[in-house]
Amino acid sequence: MVQSSLATKSQSFDLVKGEIEQTIKQAEASLERFQENRESGEDLQNCVDYLNQLRGIFILVELRGGTLLCQEAVALANDVPVGANDDKNILLTTLNSALFILRRYVEYYYQERADHPELLLPVINELREARKESPYPDSRFFDFTLQDIPDFCRAVDLPPLQSLRHDYDVYARRMRLMYQIGLLGVLKERDAVVSKKLMARAAVGFARLTSEHEMSRLWCLLSITLDTMLDYAMGFGKNRKRLMMAIEKLTRQMVYVGESAAAKPVPEHLVKELIYILYRSGSGNQEVTQLLQSVGVAPTDLPESIMETHRKRLYGPGADVLKSLSGALQEELNQLKDKLDIIERGIEPDLSEFGSIAASLERLANTLLMLDLTRMANLARRQADVLKRWEADNTLPEEKELYALADAVLSIEDAAMQIVSRGITQETDALATPEGSASNDSLYLKEALYVVADEARAALTLAKRAITAFIESDYDKLHLANLPTTLHSIWGGFMVLDDPEAANVLARIAESIQKRLLDSKDIPSQMVLEAMADALTSMEYYIETVGKRDGRNLDLLKLADTSLDDAGL
């Protein structure tokens, strides 16, 4: 039955495919004429008529994404007045882009014989945002109705808070700060792994605070969702950032309204968006599969990893073009590397070769500039200028200068290789190491940084295990005997690497363990143990950012300090 329906739909599309393509061309031509002559109301109206015609065709052949795109495009075109000034250029540009993507989607559907309207959602939202309308959520085409909200906390380990409930305000503030630091990392697009871990941990904290209320189900679902996003390296688009910001408002209520906020109804639209992320992940994890089954959602046939690949076919050049471009750039760079290798090994280098290499780098820079890869182009041009100076001065470069040139070429080569998977984007361009960046740092310093980070990571893991063993053994202090010494050794490493902020936090943790756990005769309160666990986890996440391109996340040190302050440590 379903197969017959799909076959009929496909045959219907084949009958009108030529008309669709012709109508899109006519709409584009009418829009182009209007852009050239803004007083031509007839051309603008023709464009609107063609879009309405397309919408009618898409309704007949049941292409949901095409139908909605044309509907939004008509609404946008109606907002463009005859005689439009330059302030309406963004509307016209967005409309042009929508028609281009629509044409590519028609080609995509003809090849794949599968309608995936979610691929068009970004351009549909661009049309809405150009009209100052709220964008559709990611689940716009998700055919799912939430009957009731299951207990998602069954799949999450939630240790009881016990006496910590008396310190509700303190704990809620700390969990909100943890969530905010993670959210800030998401919004700034820095270290997504650490950001997801922070937000997931905060979600578990809020689930524990609200364990006696239905609101805990939302926090448990958020924890599962963020863990899944971490496992499958799922990114944060505009809509997901908005979703996480909406959830941050709930954390604010938890802090400023108090425990009564936990008794409020669970926002169903947030639950639906989180379930959609799990659905789109394509995860085969048992907890995710069971969760989706509990709400009546079948597994997706288009997980996000594949969907992004399909979306790239609609936006920008195709994979074949990118592969050819990357190959051509690498071929040019290989020739440069061969010349540099000859100079580096030669006893009497030919100084005229410097001019030849400089000319090659300038050609490469021009090509990169045409591709809007400005950082890579500037790096190539700077190295070309250096080579020209060597030739003009008739001097041989020092070994350090020659290595700097080789590093620049290798950096550009690495970025060129990434074009195939990343596309021609700002992220690709950023792979070319800028002047004065970490490439000029001592390799020995980098190696020391990695060694200290590995040692610190191991020490903090040991500390968490030791504290867990301390609690499970009815507070046997023997498990903690070596911890202060171990943490002080890591403190010394960070001092050598000129990171006194991290060293100071480590010193505070070590001192707290010594005074409150080892020297004290009293059994530590759960508040103290929770605070130490949060401080150790914050330091662990901080160490993950050491040596990264985005730099160290000092907010994590602030979170560790706050955790210790809350417990009076």
Image (cartoon, rainbow, N blue to C red):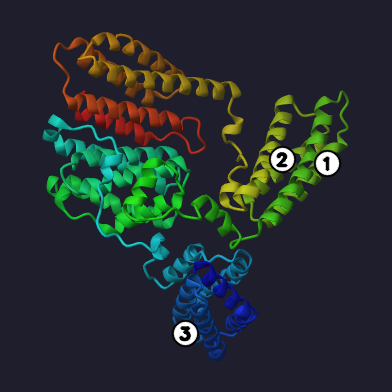
Q: Earlier in the sequence, mark 2 or mark 1?
A: 1
- Residue 367 or residue 263, whichever sits in front: 263
Helix, strand or loop under label 3: loop
- Residue 422 or residue 139, whichever sits in front: 139
| Residue 399: percent from left, percent from top | 74, 25
- Residue 184 or residue 203, whichever sits in front: 203
Q: Is residue 389 above or below residue 323?
A: above
| Residue 19: percent from left, percent from top | 62, 82
Tags 2 and 3 touching, CB below 8 Å: no
Q: Cα distance, mark 2 to mark 3?
A: 50 Å
- Disc 2 versus disc 3: nearer the observer: 3
| Residue 207: percent from left, percent from top | 23, 41
Q: Cα distance, mark 2 to mark 1?
A: 11 Å
Q: Quadrant of residue 54?
A: bottom right
Amino acid type of the residue tagged 1 in the rendering: Gly
Residue 227 shows in the view:
no
Q: Earlier in the sequence, mark 1 or mark 3?
A: 3
Residue 347, label in figure: none
Q: Which residue is mark 3?
A: 81
- Residue 193 or residue 108, whichever sits in front: 108
Q: Cα distance, mark 1 to mark 3?
A: 56 Å
Q: Which residue is drawn at the image coordinates 53% and 67% (left, top)?
A: 3
Helix, strand or loop under label 1: helix
Kindly give the residue lying farthest to the front in the view shown.
1
Image quarter of the C terminus: top left
Q: Which residue is mark 1?
A: 355
Residue 383, label in figure: 2
